[in-house]
Image (cartoon, rainbow, N blue to C red):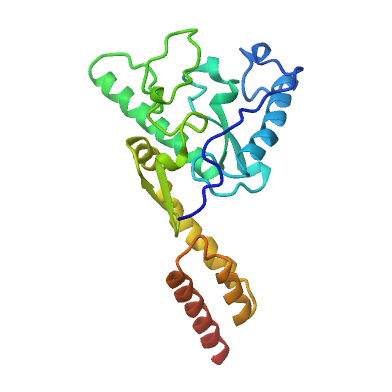
Amino acid sequence: MIKIGFEQIHPIPVLPADIVVANLKGLSWSSGVNAVTAFKDTLKPMLRKVQKGRCSLCRRFLYDDYATHLEHFIEKGIHRDFTYEVTNLSLSCGTCNIKKNGYNRTLNSLIKKRARRKGQKASKYCPVLAVKISANAPMPVSSASYRWIHPYFDRYSDNIQIEKGWIFTGKSRKGQRTIRSVKLNALAQIERRALAERLEARPGRLSKLLGATAELDKYRAGHLFKLVTKQLWKRREASDV
């Protein structure tokens, strides 16, 4: 199994006294207002530390800051009151956040089309929620209120297991929904390609073997052996031309 780094976000980050969430309500997330920028710039490093530098959805390591997203678990476009709730925010890789947002848009587009055919008006649907939230109600803080694995209120390993090769297996209905909706198993192909590129960049046979050995915590020995062998044969054939 691949190590997930952290089970859930704990302890919950505590913002400094000069950043008051209540003062941010009504401000657009993308406004660029100083108070909003200060909130983001303060929360991101706090989350990176408690998340052990890993994505809250796939548990791969986060890299450059520009490719790391402050992800809203409950969509801010559906429940604006939770835009600046710390427990509604986590760090995710760009890949996972884009897939999650794409799933939400596609699902709501289908709901809207069905409602239009029936002559009805469709309200926006948030697939991560297992409960309806009335206007001005506080954000739910119990695991039972969510259909997907919540980064603060659920233990990841109770719901998802990651096998070597980045194969995600659902251990619960929540885990299965999260894997399916965010398309986590599509990451295996991305990671295999990245692995091949890392090993290809190594100059010699010994260097490749050392590189492959360093990947044994994430890939099966048989897969690494075949990949290194293939690359060595390819390089040998090229030198014979």
Is 144 drawn above or below residue 44 in the view shown? above
x and y, in percent, of residue 143 in the image: 43, 26
In the rendered image, the vertical position of residue 231 relative to residue 79, given as above or below: below
Which residue is at the front of the view, 237 or 58?
Answer: 58
Is residue 183 in sight in this rendering?
Answer: no
Tally of numbered discs: 0
Can you give x and y, in whole percent of width and height, for residue 144 in the image?
A: 39, 24
Q: Nearer the viewer, residue 97 or 90?
A: 90
Quadrant (top left, top right, bottom left, bottom right) of the N terminus:
bottom left
> Does 59 sit left or right of 131 as displayed?
right
Q: Quadrant of residue 127?
A: top left
Q: Is residue 69 above or below residue 237?
A: above
Q: Residue furthest bottom?
A: 240
Pick out the residue farthest to the top.
Answer: 136
Q: From the image, which quarter does the C terminus lie in?
A: bottom right
| Image position of 49 (left or right of 188) | right
Q: Is residue 27 left or right of residue 141?
A: right
Taking the view exactly as shown, the residue that stands out farthest to the left is 118
Residue 132, visible in the rendered structure? yes
Q: Is residue 57 above or below residue 86?
A: below
Q: Residue at x 37, y 29 (%)?
A: 147
- The residue at 49%/25% (across/down) is 75
- Residue at point 44% right, 36% down? 102
- Where residue 96 appears, as percent x and y from the top left, is 50, 42
Residue 213 percent location from the top left of the image: 56, 70
In which quadrant of the rendered view does residue 240 lie? bottom right
Residue shown at the point (54%, 14%) measured from the top left: 81
In this image, 158 relative to 50: left or right?
Answer: left
